[in-house]
Amino acid sequence: MAAQSDSHQSNQNSQKRALDKKLDAIGWGLFLIVIGCLWLVPEKTFPESTWLIGTGIIILVLMAVRYLYSIKISGFWLVLGIIVLAFGISDVFGLNIPVFPILIIIFGASIILKPLLKKS
């Protein structure tokens, strides 16, 4: 009985790994398609930061799919998706957000918080 359980668990893990790889490929493919499509349209048709919005949405949707299928979510990609989407939207609305200093602060905070939040 235990052997069947181990076999079933191993099969689930390999299915999750396969889905994870597929999601990575889909994400990169969508990213390239968005960039290519934006390059095809005449300049000034869309705001310059449209690619940021598209990229942020792609990343966040992929993280949501991973969550729904109980695949480990990368904290880095989740935060990056939120940041990229926020900066893209803020640029569309003409808000002047200092991107680099905010990224440095977030990076520093993550260095501090990571050991504090890590399970013993």
Image (cartoon, rainbow, N blue to C red):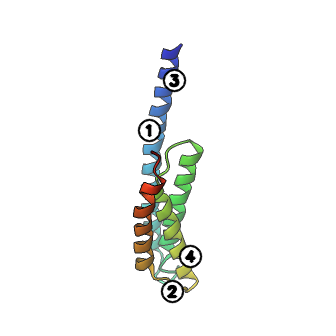
User: Mark 3: few, some, or many residues within 10 Å (few <14, many ≥20)?
Assistant: few
Label number found at residue 89? 4
Q: Helix, strand, or loop for circle 4?
A: helix
Number of the front mark, 2 or 1: 2
Residue marked by disc 3:
8
In the foreground, 26 or 52: 52
Instruction: State the residue lying farthest toward the top.
Output: 1
Does the CB distance between marks 4 and 2 fall below 8 Å?
Answer: no
Alpha carbon separation for disc pair 2 and 3: 52 Å
Q: In which quadrant of the rendered view does residue 93 lie? A: bottom right
User: Image point 54% across, 59% down: which residue?
Assistant: 60
> Neighbour class for label 4 at 10 Å: few (<14), some, many (≥20)?
some
> In the rendered structure, which disc, 2 or 3, sits on the residue that comes first in sequence?
3
Residue 21 in the image: state x and y as whole percent. Answer: 42, 44
Does residue 13 show up? yes
Distance (Cα) linking label 4 and label 2: 11 Å
Residue 17: give its label: 1
